[in-house]
Image (cartoon, rainbow, N blue to C red):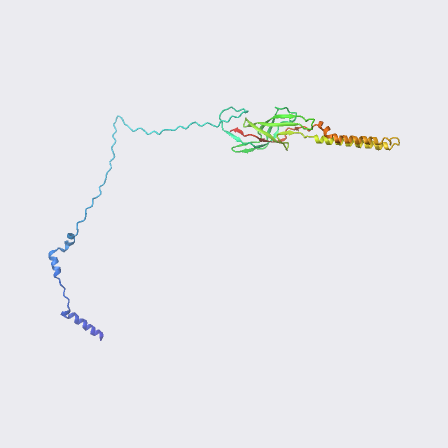
Amino acid sequence: MKRIVVAILGLYLTITPALALELDLSVDEEIRKNYNPSKLEQQNLPPLPKTATPSKTVTTQPKTTTSPKTTTSAPPKTTPTVTEPARKKVNKNLPGTTLTQDDFTAIKIKKGTKFRLKSNNLVSDYLKPGSKVSFTSLTPVYQRYVTIPAGTVFTASVVDSHLPQITGNGGLVELKIETVQFKGRTYSAHGKVTKANHKKIFINNIKGKRQYWKGVANQVEKGHKFYKKTRVTSQKLAENPVGVIISPIPTVVGVVAYVVNLAGSPVFSIGYKGGRVSIPAGSEFEIKLQEDVYLSL
């Protein structure tokens, strides 16, 4: 029922003339008379600005003309050359060697380097000052940039020597290393002996045993032996009825001799000579450099 009523009311409203809409089109007519609608936008809008079209720039290279007879070209650029001063090698003047004073590069063997050697000659207190003794190294010694191989020959000179003295002082031999041979050349070297025949050497003096106190002991021993002999003699005399009277005399003499030797042994031992110095060839030595040694390579 409601739907029917709504439908009737809608139909009534659409067909009633009083409720119809009337549009006023008079304004549109005036616009069409005075203006062209198709040109309206172009007439009112300002003209667009003109843009300049980019022009292509053409770069032309200058033409080089060459004549058939002669051609000219620019001179090449020359850079100044710098000449370095000539470098000279190290000049080491090694006195006491067989080298000339030519320039050469030297390698330094530092002061304090030790070498184990064997003697090629007899080292004895019979050697006179100025005598020469040679040694051969037993092991290689490694230094920076150089190796001193085994078999290198060192030469020493006898600085001082003497035989055993009557004051009980032993024999003496003092050696000084003077040269070393390396790659067929002889170089100056200054060194001292620190060991001889496995014994330490002090102040570079190879000395024989000082036997003064041994002489003192020998003097006391002599007095003691003489006293023992006198005691035996006294005992033999005491066995004889006649000799018993004089039997104490040998003992008294022995006591006196023993006391004299005991008290006078320091004086008597002054004339007791010391030990000899005699080290055979092939014995082991140790030397130590006292100055730097320069070797040429």
- Picture coordinates of residue 24, whole percent (x, y): 13, 63
Q: In this view, does 216 lie above or below 53?
A: above
- Picture coordinates of residue 229, whole percent (x, y): 80, 31
- Picture coordinates of residue 250, whole percent (x, y): 82, 30
Give the side of residue 157 with respect to residue 101, left or right: right
Q: How many marks do you count on the picture?
A: 0
Q: Quadrant for residue 74, please give it.
A: top left
**Is 233 or 123 nearer to us in this picture?**
233
**Is 134 or 158 nearer to us in this picture?**
158
Q: Quadrant for residue 129, please give it.
A: top right
Q: Residue furthest left?
A: 33
Q: Residue furthest right?
A: 241
Give the side of residue 236 with respect to residue 178, left or right: right
**Is 177 or 204 nearer to us in this picture?**
204
Give the side of residue 287 with respect to residue 102, left or right: right
- Picture coordinates of residue 39, whole percent (x, y): 14, 53
**Is 57 or 67 nearer to us in this picture?**
57
Q: In which quarter of the image is the N terminus?
A: bottom left
Q: Quadrant for residue 60, please give it.
A: top left
